[in-house]
Each structure stands twice: as C-alpha cells, then as structure tokens.
Image (cartoon, grey):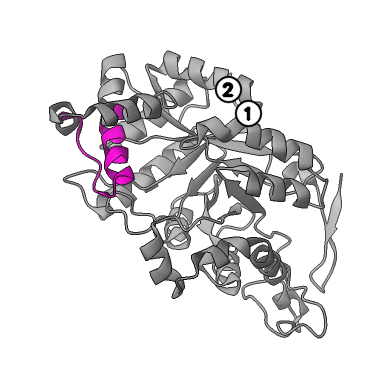
Amino acid sequence: MTYVRSAGGPQVTVDPTDDGIRGERHGTAPVPLSVLDLVTVGAGRTATDALRTSVDIAKLTEARGYHRYWVAEHHSMPGVASSSPAVILAHLAAHTGRIRLGSGGVMLPNHAPLVIAEQFGTLEAMAPGRVDLGLGRAPGTDGATAAALRRTDRLNEGADDFPQQLAELTRFLDDDFPDGHPYSRIHAVPGPVQATSPGGVQSPHRPPVWLLGSSGFSARLAGALGLPFAFAHHFSAQNTIPALDLYRESFKPSALLDAPYAVIGVSALATDDENEARRQVMAAALNMVRLRTGRPGLVPTPEEAEAHRFTEMERDFITSWNSNVVHGTPDQVRSGLDDLAKRTGADELMLTANAHSGEVRLRSYDLIASAYGLPEA
C-alpha cells in the first residue's frame, strides 16, 4: 500500500516498505533485533560512564545490524540515567548514521504535546528519516514524582486523557488542526509549517508514532488507530500474549500500516560463561527487589548480590523475575529468543541488557549478534 503525505506543500508519495517501522532480519535471527537502553548506572560508576556506554552500544549495534535503538523515560531512579530521552537521542544521533533512534518511550501525560512535537521535530531534523516517537501513558516513576513533574495531584486525569493527548500531539506533528480550533495558528517547529512558508522545503519524513504498553489499554488503542505497538514483556511477561492478541484483533489498517506490527521488549544477557550470566542477572534482580520495595539505588555488583542475605519473599520474587530473563551462553540466549519469537509471534525483538557493568552489557549485544551471524562490526 502506497500513501501520500501532504503538509500544505507538494505531495510526497512514500513507499511503506521504507517506512522505518518494519525492520530487516539479518543472519539467522528469527525477526529483526533492536535495543532498549535504560542507561543503567552501576555502583561505583557515574551517569557520565553510563552515557558513554550508551554511545558505545549504539555504535556497536548499528555496525552489527540491529534495527533500532530506543531509550525510556524514567524519573527519580538513581540507577537509571534516562530521564530526558530527547537529550540522549540527540547525543546518540551525533555518533550514529543508520540505526533508528527513538523513545521507548516518552510518557505523554508528563509533557505538553506541543513540547514533544517540537523535541521530536528537532530530532528528525538532526537525523532525518530515522527517528521513532514511542509513547506511554504511565508516569515512568512513583506517584509523588509524577505529581512534581505534572504540577498536579490529579494523576489519573493524565492517563484517562491519553487518547485526547495523543490526538493533539499527532495534529501538532502533522500541522493539521482544523480552522477555528484554538491551536490552528500554533505550529510545532521544526515541522510541516516550514514547507508552507515562502521558499520553504519540508522533509518528507515525520517520526512515526508508536504506542507502548504493559497491559491491554494501549494494545487496543494502537490497533484501533493502526499504529505500531511495543509491549513491555521484560516486566509484564504474563500479559504479553493476551496484549498482542488484543492488538492484532483490534487492528484497523491506517495510512501508516496496512497490517499489525508488534515489538516486544526482552531482558536478555549473554556472557561467555553460563555461571557468569547467572551472577550478572542476580545483581540486576537485586536492584529490582530494591526498586519494588521503595529503595531504588544504583545497580549492585555481582559480588554485592552474592553477599546479600535474601529473605524468602525476595528469593521468590527473584525466581519469578529471572524466569523471564533470557540469559546464559550465546547459544542458550539464541535458543531462548527463538522460542520467545515463536511463542509470541512478535515482529521484532527489542533486547535490553541489564547488568552492573557497561562492558558486560556491550559484550552481550556483540555475542548475541555473533550467535545469529549478524554482520561483523
């Protein structure tokens, strides 16, 4: 299906096979592989260290054929340095040239839609044709921090208004508020309005909007709007298949997509030794225990995790949590990812490597790429 975009200037015909959504599968990977980076900060490391690791991972995964690289909005978490996705993406754009860059995601209720349209219009101008705008309706933090971000205690209002906020953001991105609308004379710049100015030329690209979710709400909305959908399997695995089924059942073709396209986020860590993989994921799991019990901190070292005296409740949580982390040797991780792709029917796997050390995370993406015979760096 070919469709046409118009921003008040010349019409531009776009081939949907080059829409930036559908990834290309490389080597023996069952589906395209991508990266979700939480910009994790380990104990004894700084945010500067974490951001340098992100650049290294982006450059490596671009060279090895991964399709996209997303960062997620989180707040008030010492071990996660990704509170400002647009800023990080601008930094990554300066160090890459092919891999798609995007948010996984920006939490729409935390921001004015116009601000997001301006930020991602700027990113699109920096990296034409390779920017994704993934949106979530959760706060990406606790209630008190969300209230501080939004300057209101009415937190449910933002989530309930998500479809309206999404519609407003989309109109700012397309610059197509109808005549008489209060915002009809307001324009997100950079954006389509520049094509209507004397001598104006506008890029044919516009960041595609993705909806993100960990339950059925966004799955159903993404399907109804004909948008691509990304599901947080890495922390809501029990809901993955029901949400994907709901997305596919409710999907209606749109100008952007003629068929459903679903990505799932997957915790995956490969090391040269199986025992070392277990050590690393135990440290990451201890970090999750602390987060879930209101004690967020830096990602502990494997040595700290080995010395920790886990309660029975903590051990139960870790057993459940790590059952959804694909980890081990490269061959074991490849087998786990193959099985997950088959069980879920996901169109793309977005891998997130959670570990204390940036070097371990970088090595994991390299090992997985080699296990699937992806292009050599």
What amino acid type is highlighted by mark number 1?
Arg
Question: Residue at the location (68% across, 83% down)?
Answer: 186
Q: Which residues are magenta?
A: 281-303
Q: Is residue 291 magenta?
A: yes
Q: Is residue 178 above or below residue 82?
A: below
Question: Residue at the location (62% across, 73% down)?
Answer: 190
What amino acid type is highlighted by mark number 2?
Ala
Residue 184 placement (x, y as % from top left): 75, 82
Which SS does the magenta portion mostly show? helix
Choose between 278 and 39: the one closer to the eye.
278
Q: Quadrant of the N terminus?
A: top right
38 left or right of 196?
A: left
363 left or right of 182?
A: left
Q: Is residue 142 above or below residue 56?
A: below
Q: Dot 2: within a 10 Å radius of its alpha carbon, few (fewer than 14), some, or many (20 or more) residues?
A: many
- Please name the residue that numbered disc 1 is placed on: 25
Callout 1: helix, strand or loop? loop
- Please name the residue that numbered disc 2 is placed on: 29
Q: Quadrant of the C terminus?
A: top left
